Amino acid sequence: MNYICTTCGTQFAETDSPPDTCPICADERQYIGWEGQRWTTLAELQADYHNVIKTAEPGLTGIGTHPHFAIGQRALLVQTPQGNVLWDCISLLDDPTIAAVEALGGIQAIAISHPHFYSSMVEWGRAFQAPIYLHESDRRWVMRPDPAIHFWQGETLSLWDGVTLIRCGGHFAGSTVLHWRDGAEGQGVLLTGDTLQVVSDRRYVSFMRSYPNLIPLSAAAVRRIVDALAPYSFERIYGGWWDRVVAGDAQAAVARSAARYLQALQAEGGATGEDDLA
């Protein structure tokens, strides 16, 4: 049985009984569920959940599970003349989803931002006979190894013309974003998961080592992210969840977000405004 952690949604290698704990959730960036370590299976998910598929913009389709499961992210299917890339992944895969994705041209490659979204990547890879691209720095977090997983090294990987993986680091050592040159009517799109987290004020993004446990990144880590993105143009950012989108002027949004973050780190006592000492 391939058990799935109900807190992070990661599917594990086949075992006769559930693992004792999920190493991804036991890490300081995540957490064991408040009711303790719990497990499910793909068959149980298929019985109780379904996937919602919606167009985000021409050539970009969101795929997310309803009702909310685990971390609740949605995947994105980038459709290009050279092939389709599934960006990030979700735990649920079923026959209706496979049929809907096949109608959109299938999947020729899968790329995932970081270990919290590895989910059922092997199921997706096998269903569409697609290679899975993960950064080498995060190899230790793969809970279900498979020959289809390709660990890439270095700072960038071009999947094909106009679709580039960029290692930013920060959240995880191998945290990655995807740059889609032809998105946003040719102005460029950045798919970020939560390497750059689109916040509730969608004029901004933020940067954290852990979001649920509120562990910030260092100034050096944030500068590294900004530097990694400097060569690329992008008008729009799609974060890891429905509606977490910087709809325009996204390159400037990253610059002002980084500047605000760094100013907060540098301010005496962390104060960012007159009211902080009230």
Image (cartoon, grey):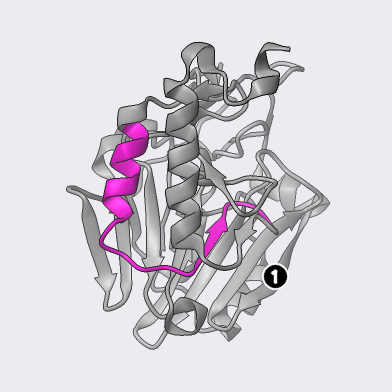
Residue 45 percent location from the top left of the image = 73, 48
Could you tell me which residue is drawn at 50 percent across and 17 percent down? 28
Q: From the image, tell me which residue sits under label 1.
A: 53
Q: Quadrant of the C terminus?
A: top right
Secondary element at image label 1: strand
Q: Which residues are magenta?
A: 221-242
Residue positioned 45% across, 30% down in the render: 263
Inspect this view and state whether residue 147 appears.
no
Q: Nearer the viewer, residue 120 or 18?
A: 120
Q: Is residue 174 above or below residue 50?
A: above
- Residue that sits furthest to the bottom in the current view: 81
Q: State the image coordinates of residue 205 (x, y, percent, origin top left).
A: 54, 46
Q: Residue at x 68, y 33 (%)?
A: 6
Q: Is residue 273 visible?
A: yes
Residue type for callout 1: Ile
Q: Quadrant of residue 62?
A: bottom right
Residue visible at 39% across and 32% down? 141
Q: Where does the image place residue 273, in percent across and percent down from the top left?
A: 62, 25
Residue 139 x/y as whole percent? 30, 36
